[in-house]
Image: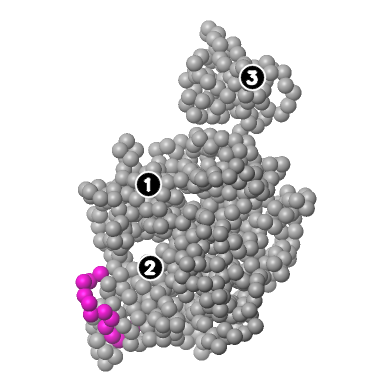
Amino acid sequence: MSAWDLLVTVEDLGSDAPPVTLSVASDLHVGGVILKLVEKTQIKRDWSDHALWWEQKQRWLLRTAWTLEKYGIHADARLVFMPQHKPLRLGLPNGNTLRLRACFSSSVFQTVMGVCRMLNIRHPEEHSFLRPVEEKKKKKDKDSAEEIYDLTEVPLSSASRPCLYNGMPAHFADSPQMEAIYKMLSVTQPPPAPEVITKQFRPASVVDKAHINGRWLDSSRCLMQQGIQENDRVWLRFKYFASYDIDPKYDVVRLTQLYEQARWAILLEDIDCTEEEMMLFGALQYHISKVSESEPQALSSSAAMDDLESALQSLEVKMEGESSSVSEMLENMTAPELNDYLKIFRPKRLTLKGYKQYWFKFQDTSISYFKSKEESIGEPIQQINLKGCEVAPDVNVTAQKFLIRLLIPAPEGMNEVYLRCENEQQYAQWMAGCRLASKGKSLADSSFQSEIQSIRSFLAMQKTSSGSHGNANANDESINPHSLVSPRYHKKYKAKQLTPRILDAYQNVAQLSLTDAVMRFLQIWQALPDFGLSYVVVRFKGSRKDEVLGIAPNRLIRIDLAVGDVVKTWRYNNMKQWNVNWDIRQVAIEFEGNINIAFACVTADCKIVHEFIGGYIFMSTRSRSKSDTLNEELFHKLTGGHEAL
């Protein structure tokens, strides 16, 4: 074969150095090109991390056994020889920035896995990279003032779990500086100054919230293919709100960063909550920052002790299980029921009647209601099967409002039903029953009582203890309430009006340990009606106006942009198939009952929506038995589309 000249730029020679000219033939493989190149540069160093990047085609030539002909490379190809791992500035959910070496040649999915492994974050599939929102540069020195934690010297390991030393990855135990970085990752940050909160971008509408989701990087392509260069800045964020297998013992960094992301979502009004909830969030933040200052993060004990602990616990459970008496066993065999008068309201029907009282009966996983207690022997007015339904609380303890919002699956979407309870006791029982039934469990399930207990302790936290305003804590100088609530409340209330309300709520959480307080904060966040919704502005096929699509962990929601009302809900478990027409960039989904929808995306690429849906379906396939191994191939199959090679 005739020889021809190939020009290759070697990044290590500096930006001014001319390209190296190699004489090659089309049957020469990529490995041979690299060998010739290294010989010609005459630099003695480890080249193992280097590879060739083809500029025009925006692709890495990683298959070193492939020939130039197979890749389709001719004399006009602009090739660059450079390292695959380069420094990247990574913005964390807690607002700090790390500088670390990341892989620029693997898919973003694998790069995120590598970064999470380094930072000791389990379940990296829930994370992804986001392009940061452009900040307006007002002062020249703004960037230089930012502290950057440097991790570029940490060697990259391929082990699926890092080797732990004193509860943290060994590379963080090397020096006091590295330990300080691990502390920054695993201990919550102090409340931000009010002016820091007000300076941040706050979404004013659902459309603003939708714009951020256009910034997610594509999981199946590498950083270089998406225009990310060495030392560029990206954000690491939780993308899929389907937290799985959280264990405070092993997930210190993961829990802390999830808390930080939740805290900022509340402070910047990314997610809506009531005034009462805001005060409780403020109280929990105050408590968490107070406790984390006084109680250094307890690093987990050695692995052998952990194993012993869990073995003893399971033995205890077995012993308890065996000692149950005959009468208890008989009691468990007769399935428990709930019977009571409740009020019901269906907001979808255009009625002004409001709530009507009926006699309700809760059996197995369904609710039936009758005109009165006397008529409950006959046929019910309606029986509602709760399996697979959505259950959301709508509670205001001070106003004695105890509502249970039920979204019942139906072929054409979801039917909404509100149940109104009279008091706390009744609400705790029925709410617990609904939650279990939605998962397909009956009232006989062993977790029924503990579910009631957790709901009651949750309500107790929202109660304000009257008369406690005058206590010594109210004069606590260390509290700056404007650091704990969103800017809307800075305008609405003076600091001295907020302080007693936050300290009031604080009375109910002051006894919690640091881990319990963080877990409780996350629980309340996850119970908010809009939790886990990622918005995208779309145009449905056959429609003339833009609408909003809310993507949740288990369903899609069509929202009217003008009014903000939910028009339709479709659940993933009713989905037969979904695909994308990449030519016209349109997503088409088919549901059971011959329901078809199709839409084009306005504020994000359709690949991002495709990845969200596929990602959530992937999250639902994870099982505890295989929790250590991540089925990467299945993730790419579900999220990659036709581009997943």
The part of the image, by quadrant, that contains residue 373 is bottom left
**Farthest right residue in view:** 175
Q: Is residue 349 covered in magenta?
A: yes
* Residue located beneath label 1 in the image: 603
User: Residue 559: image x %, image y %?
Assistant: 31, 58
Q: Residues within 10 Å of mark 3 (few under 14, many from 20)?
A: few
Name which residue type carries label 1: Thr
* Residue located beneath label 3 in the image: 17
Q: First in sequence, mark 3 or 2: give its number.
A: 3
* Residue 142 in the figure: left or right of residue 633: right
* Residue located beneath label 2 in the image: 390
What residue span does the magenta drawing correspond to?
A: 348-361
The answer to whether residue 334 shows anywhere in this view is no
Name which residue type carries label 3: Ala
Location of residue 441 with respect to 182 vertically, above or below: below
316 or 6, nearer to the observer:
6
Name which residue type carries label 2: Glu
User: Residue 492: image x %, image y %?
Assistant: 46, 70
* Residue 22 in the figure: left or right of residue 406: right
